[in-house]
Image (cartoon, rainbow, N blue to C red):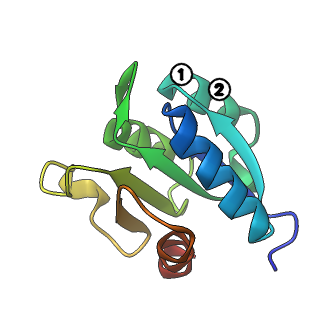
Amino acid sequence: MVANLKILLVEDEVLVAAIAVDALEELGYQIIEATTAKAALEAAASDIGSFALAIVDVGLPDGRGDTLALELRRMREDLPIIIATGHGDSGLDERLRNKQTFVLGKPYDISQLHAAIKSVA
Protein backbone atom coordinates (compact mmCIF):
# COMPACT_ATOMS: atom_id res chain seq x y z
CA MET A 1 0.00 0.00 0.00
CA VAL A 2 1.13 3.52 -0.78
CA ALA A 3 -1.21 5.43 1.49
CA ASN A 4 -1.71 9.10 0.76
CA LEU A 5 0.56 9.34 -2.28
CA LYS A 6 -1.10 11.51 -4.90
CA ILE A 7 -1.26 10.86 -8.61
CA LEU A 8 -2.27 13.41 -11.21
CA LEU A 9 -4.41 11.51 -13.74
CA VAL A 10 -4.99 13.39 -16.99
CA GLU A 11 -7.51 11.46 -19.10
CA ASP A 12 -10.46 12.76 -21.11
CA GLU A 13 -12.12 9.41 -21.85
CA VAL A 14 -14.64 8.90 -19.03
CA LEU A 15 -14.55 5.09 -19.03
CA VAL A 16 -10.74 4.89 -19.15
CA ALA A 17 -10.50 7.44 -16.33
CA ALA A 18 -13.03 5.55 -14.20
CA ILE A 19 -11.15 2.28 -14.61
CA ALA A 20 -7.80 3.94 -13.86
CA VAL A 21 -9.16 5.70 -10.76
CA ASP A 22 -10.62 2.44 -9.42
CA ALA A 23 -7.36 0.59 -10.04
CA LEU A 24 -5.18 3.32 -8.54
CA GLU A 25 -7.37 3.73 -5.48
CA GLU A 26 -7.25 -0.04 -5.02
CA LEU A 27 -3.45 0.30 -4.98
CA GLY A 28 -3.80 2.95 -2.27
CA TYR A 29 -3.21 6.17 -4.20
CA GLN A 30 -5.13 9.43 -3.86
CA ILE A 31 -6.16 10.58 -7.35
CA ILE A 32 -6.45 14.13 -8.63
CA GLU A 33 -8.24 14.00 -11.99
CA ALA A 34 -8.07 16.38 -14.93
CA THR A 35 -9.68 16.01 -18.35
CA THR A 36 -7.72 18.75 -20.11
CA ALA A 37 -4.14 19.99 -20.21
CA LYS A 38 -5.28 23.34 -18.80
CA ALA A 39 -6.96 21.70 -15.79
CA ALA A 40 -3.89 19.51 -15.22
CA LEU A 41 -1.57 22.52 -15.22
CA GLU A 42 -3.85 24.33 -12.77
CA ALA A 43 -3.85 21.32 -10.43
CA ALA A 44 -0.08 20.95 -10.71
CA ALA A 45 0.61 24.65 -10.21
CA SER A 46 -1.14 24.64 -6.87
CA ASP A 47 0.90 21.77 -5.41
CA ILE A 48 3.27 20.04 -7.88
CA GLY A 49 5.51 18.83 -5.05
CA SER A 50 2.79 16.65 -3.56
CA PHE A 51 2.40 14.37 -6.57
CA ALA A 52 4.12 10.98 -6.59
CA LEU A 53 3.69 10.90 -10.37
CA ALA A 54 1.48 11.91 -13.28
CA ILE A 55 -0.34 9.70 -15.76
CA VAL A 56 -1.01 11.64 -18.95
CA ASP A 57 -3.05 10.61 -21.97
CA VAL A 58 -1.49 11.66 -25.28
CA GLY A 59 -4.75 12.75 -26.90
CA LEU A 60 -6.37 15.56 -24.93
CA PRO A 61 -9.10 17.91 -26.16
CA ASP A 62 -6.93 21.00 -25.73
CA GLY A 63 -3.51 19.72 -26.76
CA ARG A 64 -1.05 16.88 -26.86
CA GLY A 65 -0.27 15.00 -23.69
CA ASP A 66 3.44 14.80 -24.42
CA THR A 67 3.53 18.61 -24.61
CA LEU A 68 1.73 18.71 -21.26
CA ALA A 69 4.26 16.23 -19.85
CA LEU A 70 7.10 18.57 -20.86
CA GLU A 71 5.32 21.48 -19.18
CA LEU A 72 4.90 19.41 -16.01
CA ARG A 73 8.62 18.58 -16.13
CA ARG A 74 9.44 22.28 -16.38
CA MET A 75 7.45 22.76 -13.19
CA ARG A 76 9.16 19.82 -11.48
CA GLU A 77 12.11 18.22 -13.21
CA ASP A 78 12.03 14.96 -11.24
CA LEU A 79 8.29 14.24 -11.65
CA PRO A 80 7.81 10.64 -12.82
CA ILE A 81 5.41 10.54 -15.77
CA ILE A 82 3.50 7.72 -17.43
CA ILE A 83 2.36 8.54 -20.96
CA ALA A 84 -0.78 6.56 -21.89
CA THR A 85 -1.30 6.12 -25.62
CA GLY A 86 -3.04 3.85 -28.04
CA HIS A 87 -0.62 4.84 -30.82
CA GLY A 88 2.78 3.65 -29.61
CA ASP A 89 5.67 5.90 -28.67
CA SER A 90 7.11 6.71 -32.10
CA GLY A 91 5.67 10.24 -32.14
CA LEU A 92 6.65 11.22 -28.61
CA ASP A 93 9.09 14.02 -27.95
CA GLU A 94 12.66 12.73 -27.49
CA ARG A 95 13.01 14.81 -24.31
CA LEU A 96 10.55 12.44 -22.63
CA ARG A 97 12.66 9.36 -23.22
CA ASN A 98 14.33 8.79 -19.86
CA LYS A 99 14.08 6.60 -16.78
CA GLN A 100 11.36 8.76 -15.23
CA THR A 101 9.03 8.36 -18.19
CA PHE A 102 7.15 5.21 -19.13
CA VAL A 103 4.97 4.76 -22.21
CA LEU A 104 1.92 2.66 -21.39
CA GLY A 105 -0.14 1.25 -24.25
CA LYS A 106 -3.91 1.58 -24.16
CA PRO A 107 -6.00 -0.25 -23.29
CA TYR A 108 -4.20 -1.29 -20.13
CA ASP A 109 -5.16 -3.34 -17.10
CA ILE A 110 -4.36 -2.93 -13.40
CA SER A 111 -1.26 -5.14 -13.56
CA GLN A 112 0.18 -3.17 -16.49
CA LEU A 113 -0.59 0.09 -14.71
CA HIS A 114 1.04 -1.15 -11.51
CA ALA A 115 4.15 -2.28 -13.46
CA ALA A 116 4.37 1.15 -15.14
CA ILE A 117 4.17 2.88 -11.75
CA LYS A 118 6.91 0.64 -10.35
CA SER A 119 9.15 1.38 -13.33
CA VAL A 120 9.08 5.17 -12.85
CA ALA A 121 8.78 5.46 -9.07
Labels 2 & 1 near each other (Cβ < 8 A): yes
Residue type at mark 1: give it.
Lys
Which of the numbered marks, if any, corresponds to residue 110? none
Percent x, y of residue 74: 47, 44
Q: Residue at x 50, y 74 (%)?
A: 120
Residue closest to the eye, 54 or 46: 54
Task: Give the Cα distance between marks 2 and 1.
Answer: 6 Å
Q: Which residue is mark 1?
A: 38
Q: Residue at x 45, y 60 (%)?
A: 82
Residue closest to the eye, 67 or 82: 82
Residue closest to the eye, 58 or 80: 58
Q: Secondary structure at mark 2?
A: helix
Residue type at mark 2: give it.
Glu
**Which of the 4 image quarters holds residue 83?**
bottom left
Which of the numbered marks, if any, corresponds to residue 42? 2
Locate the N terminus by quadrant. Answer: bottom right
Residue closest to the eye, 96 or 77: 96
Query: Within 10 Å of the Cα at label 2, are there few (<14), some (14-19), or many (20+) other Cα atoms?
Result: few
The answer to whether residue 86 is left or right of residue 73 is left
Query: Within 10 Å of the Cα at label 1, are there few (<14), some (14-19), or many (20+) other Cα atoms?
Result: some
The answer to whether residue 58 is left or right of residue 94 is right
Compared with 73, 99 (above or below) is below
Percent x, y of residue 66: 33, 43
The answer to whether residue 66 is left or right of residue 117 is left
